[in-house]
Amino acid sequence: MSDSTPAVTRAAAETAAADGGAPPRAASSIRLEGLHKRFGRDTVALDGVDLTIEAGEFFTLLGPSGCGKTTLLRILAGLEEPNAGRLWIGGRDVTDTPPHRRSVNTVFQSYALFPHLSVRDNLAFGLRMRGESAAERERKVAEVAEFIQLGSLVERRVDQLSGGQKQRIALARALVCEPDVLLLDEPLSALDAGLRSQLQVELQRLQKRLGMTFVFVTHDQDEAMVMSDRIAVLDGGVIQQVGTPSEVYEHPANAFVARFMGHDNLVAITAVDGDRVETRLGWLRLAPAERRAESDGWLLIRPETLVLDDALPEGYNRLEGTVEERLYRGSRIEYRVTVNGQPLMVVASNLGQRMHEIGDRVVIGVCPEDLVRVAA
Amino acid sequence: MVESSLTASRRRAVVGETRHLLFSVTPGAAWITVFLVLPSLYLMAVAFMTNGPYGLPEMPLSLDAFRQLAGFGFLGWSPGNLYTLLRSLWQTVVSTALVVVVAYPLAYYITTCRERWRPLMLLAVVVPSWTNQVIRTFGWMNLLAPGTPLSDLAESLGLIGPHMGLYPSDFAVTLGLVYNFLPFMVLPLYAAFEKLDVAQVQAAQDLYASPVRAFRHAVFPQTLPGLLAGTVLVAIPAFGMYVIPELLGGGKSMMLGNLVARQFSGGSNWPLGAAGAILMLLATFVGLYAMRRIGRRLGGGEEVVI
């Protein structure tokens, strides 16, 4: 297959063949150094961001609203200028390059489709602005429309599309330009849950097939974990942690990341004695790797690692508590247990075992290997 | 059996609906008939009658009025009326274009302001039109008359001859028209701009459009319905304008409206006035049709409602 073949065509061909092999296109890496962005006099959106995004990576900027993730994305697109810092895309310094000269395309949260143009003209917009010939435009638009399986919609007007269709058209309008980097600003947030999880999988597959660098913005940690190669968690305009989904989930860098990743069981450490720490739950033994002299920070106890059983394996920490609440989730059962007045979430896989009733006294086993110390 | 009862009930429904429709349409239709259709028919009839000794229409029917309108009088052909028609067209085109030039950025600017200031700014645009048009036009006379600071300034810049004053002149008429019709362009344009999503402009830039091309391809087409609506609201009344050329033109800058008005008010020639009014009506229809065509072409085949 020649190099001039559009990425989407190649990707489509590859789906027909088999997966694997080298990425089909030369993706671009991104490097950010010391990015600062202020709005007005005292709203700091980004406060010194350094970050490297590898070529061909599915990278997610994750954080609550107002954390600076969208600002960062808009700086990558060129729609916002940083007050300080530099930005390289594909090794080229593009800090001062206007958006229309960057080989970067964006899928906007509101989709931002042009209501005065047909779907076809929306898809061709970028190609037309770039000065590609009518024949070339027609070919690429037909290809991308087929690729996203919306070929039958090209004559429609934008206001005749459903939300999911608009989302796909917005994606296709960006993809057809074959940018070095594709930016996605919460593109799934307006869709209902079913469509959303379906598109999460589709987007992730698509990115792997195209081998294009994707930078994805979301406030939904589940979405981030499902889709990403790596995640940067932002808060207050500062990157709190960068890592793979399992690194960020299992070893959060601080209490903010832990809470944001959905951890409920975070208990303050009050004292340290060798390989044991004291919390409101009582004294707990840690694995040697987590041994540290400082008696501050938090202890992260993942609910799914806890064992509800009277007969505990050797070496387990043993806690006793009362069941306060039970949520039956089908595949799993969630208990809220109080231990020494401290609430603790316990998640048990539903394997047909006897369920505990509210008010039951239960023994909770905590494996030292599953305990993680988290900085304040 | 079942079928016939169905038909009967359907017929009853149709009758009911027709009655309902009649009730809702009749008052409007009656209004239009009495105040628009009948007077227009009367006007048309007058245009084809002969001018009597006291300026009132008389029988027999003739084309005299149209002949006079075209410039044929007792002393042969004169270009006066033709000039008046051309001046009306020219003033309409120039003042509408100037209104667009002022209103387009103004409407855009208002949409970029904070939301709580916008109604106030729109109000500032509209408030002058709450004052009587004649009074406002007299105001301009006082501002532009010879010896006023504006006239002196224009004179010292060599724009006008000594003691000429900016009024009376074609310029004063244009200025008066632009001033008078500005709100009618600003409001529909503001509505168009307000509907526009900023993200679309950014999307255009993201898709390789320079700022100029983003405006041309993403912004301008979306404001076109507002622009065309504003053009119709400005150009049609401007074409038939009477007060402004009467007061600011000083008799030298007569427009079609003044020509028509003179035939009726002076009691000089009703059939000629009626013929002028019909010409004005025809020109308006031609203009509207042209706007529709333009709208359709620029709007990419899409219906632009005027």
Image (cartoon, helix red, strand yellow):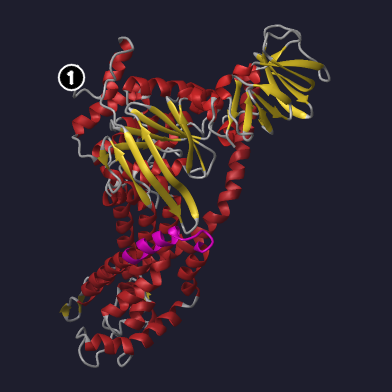
Q: Is residue B58 visible?
A: no
Residue for point 23% across, 32% down:
A137
Image coordinates of residue A199 in percent, x first then y, are: 46, 24
The correct choice, above or below, for A175 with respect to B152 in the image is above
Q: SS for tag 1?
A: loop
Quarter of the picture containing the C terminus of chain A is: top right
Image coordinates of residue A229 in percent, x first then y, are: 42, 24
Few, some or many C-alpha atoms within 10 Å of disc 1 (few <14, some 14-19, many ≥20)? few
Image coordinates of residue B132 in percent, x first then y, are: 48, 78
- Choose top left, top right, bottom left or bottom right for residue A151: top left
Nearest the viewer among A109 and A280 is A280
Callout 1: chain = A
Residue for point 38% across, 73% down:
B179
Task: Identify residue for label 1.
Answer: A2
What segment is highlighted magenta in the picture? B101-118
* Residue type marked 1: Ser
